[in-house]
Amino acid sequence: MNDRYQKIYNSIKKLDRNKEFLQNICNILKEKIKHFDWVGFYLIEEENKNILVLGPYKGEPTEHTRIEIGEGICGQAADQKETFEVPDVRKENNYLSCSPDVKSEIVVPIFKNYEVIGEIDIDSHEYDPFVEDDKKLLNKIAKLVSEYL
């Protein structure tokens, strides 16, 4: 990761692990990375492991507060246990639209004991904005969050 992204990660790593931890991560990412227009966490529901529930986020409100595993990009990432990057949401059949402004999305699963326990979801108002450093940063944050959850 370049220095800028490393500094962002270091500032997140220093955050207190309290009830505001995930919200503070959202705030930092949205503030520091221009093309991160919506930053949020979805967490696997305790009672029903087939549902992702919206957690802390920063950006416009979304109607997608509960997503079934397999549904949309978030559900697909959880189902297939891998990062999904969609450079142009218009070309994705399984996309759940949150806003007409969203042009691209990346979803990075959070694992604990090889099981998906949640994910980081990023929407952008630009087409194909995500670079390798974005992916590296989000994966490092996912590992950090897995230790917290």
Image (cartoon, helix red, strand yellow):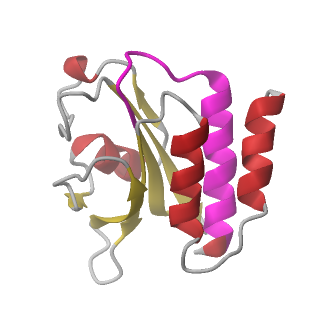
Please tell me whether residue 125 belongs to the stretch shown in magenta: yes
Looking at the picture, tell me which residue is in the foreground, 8 or 75. 8
Tell me residue 130's x, y (percent): 52, 23
Q: In this figure, what is the number of numbered marks?
A: 0
Name the residue located 80 percent from the left edge and 42 percent from the top edge: 7
Tell me residue 37's x, y (percent): 41, 36
Q: Is residue 48 visible?
A: yes
Name the residue located 23 percent from the left edge and 17 percent from the top edge: 91
Name the residue located 80 percent from the left edge and 27 percent from the top edge: 2
- Say which quadrant the N terminus sits in: top right
Tell me where residue 32 sits by quadrant. top right
Tell me residue 100's x, y (percent): 17, 29
> In the image, is 131 to the left or to the right of 13?
left
Q: Which residues are magenta?
A: 123-147
Please tell me whether residue 49 belongs to the stretch shown in magenta: no
> In the image, is 6 to the left or to the right of 142?
right
Residue 98's place in the image compared with 145, above or below, is above
Residue projecting furthest to the bottom: 47
